[in-house]
Amino acid sequence: MSKKTDTTRRAIVGATVGVGLGLGAISMLVPIGALKPKKEVTPETEPPKKGDVFVFAEGDKKGDEITFADLPKGGPFVLAFPKDPKTGVIKNGERNNMVLLIRLDPGELSPETAEYAADGTVAYSAICTHLGCTVSDWVADKGDLLCPCHKGIYDPRQGAKVVGGPPPRPLPALPIQTEGDKPVCAGGFTSPVGVVAGLEPQGGSCAV
């Protein structure tokens, strides 16, 4: 066998082994990725659940439980976090748990919205469905919710329907019920909170 033939054969064998090792390494990515630990859920990060009460998320009354008397009729909204009444744990360790509580005229609510309301009071996620900013402004003359980042506007009387700006979908609602003088969670959010992959902003873009 000539030196040239032997060299060629070694090159072919080496390339074949290299490709095999490469494919083996790639195939290992799936099981390794599958072993990535999931985000740990703690009492402070657990999503809202039936029976949770609400506490002020900011201001002088931060941490105090909210009653219907604390909610101005006709708005503006109050930023809140859910609290487990049994353990006393406030679920403020997860930003997605932040809620907008608004007390409105029951006669102004759409039929669908009224199903999730209590005494005209509605609760929505405070996380904008556009890019995940906090919906923190109130349009007083129209009674709408406003995200200051890209001017997303939601109508709380119609299930937080998008009435302006780039958000691709309404804010998720949080069903509530009456317990004494307080609004209380009657279940979890009606849809995923925040940004959902694959949903394009209305109009295809946003204006700062």
Image (cartoon, rainbow, N blue to C red):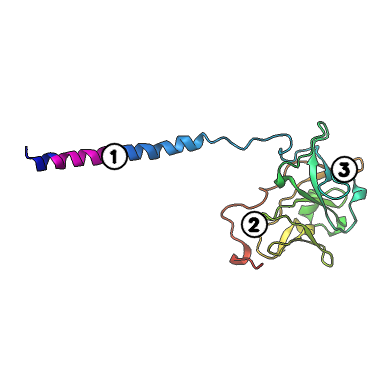
Mark 1, mark 3: which one is toward the viewer?
1
Residue 189: image location, x then y, percent: 72, 45
Magenta part of the protein: which range?
7-17
Query: What residue sits 77% from the left and 57% below the top?
Result: 136
Residue 77: image location, x then y, percent: 83, 55
Decide: is 130 above or below 80: below
At label 2, the amino acid type is Leu
Q: Are marks 1 and 2 in contact (CB under 8 Å)?
A: no
Q: Return the residue at label 1.
A: 18
What element does badge 1 sit on?
A: helix
Query: What residue sits 71% from the left and 43% below the top?
Result: 94
At label 3, the amino acid type is Asp
Q: Which of the marked residues, 3 or 2, is nearer the chain's N terminus?
A: 3
Q: Return the residue at label 2.
A: 131
Crowding near pointer 2: few (<14 within 10 Å), some, many (20+)?
A: some
Residue 91: image location, x then y, percent: 76, 40
Residue 167: image location, x then y, percent: 66, 60
Query: What residue sits 81% from the left and 31% below the top?
Result: 87
Magenta stretch holds residue 8: yes
Left or right: where does residue 69 sit relative to residue 28?
right
Left or right: where does residue 60 sit relative to residue 89?
right
Crowding near pointer 3: few (<14 within 10 Å), some, many (20+)?
A: some
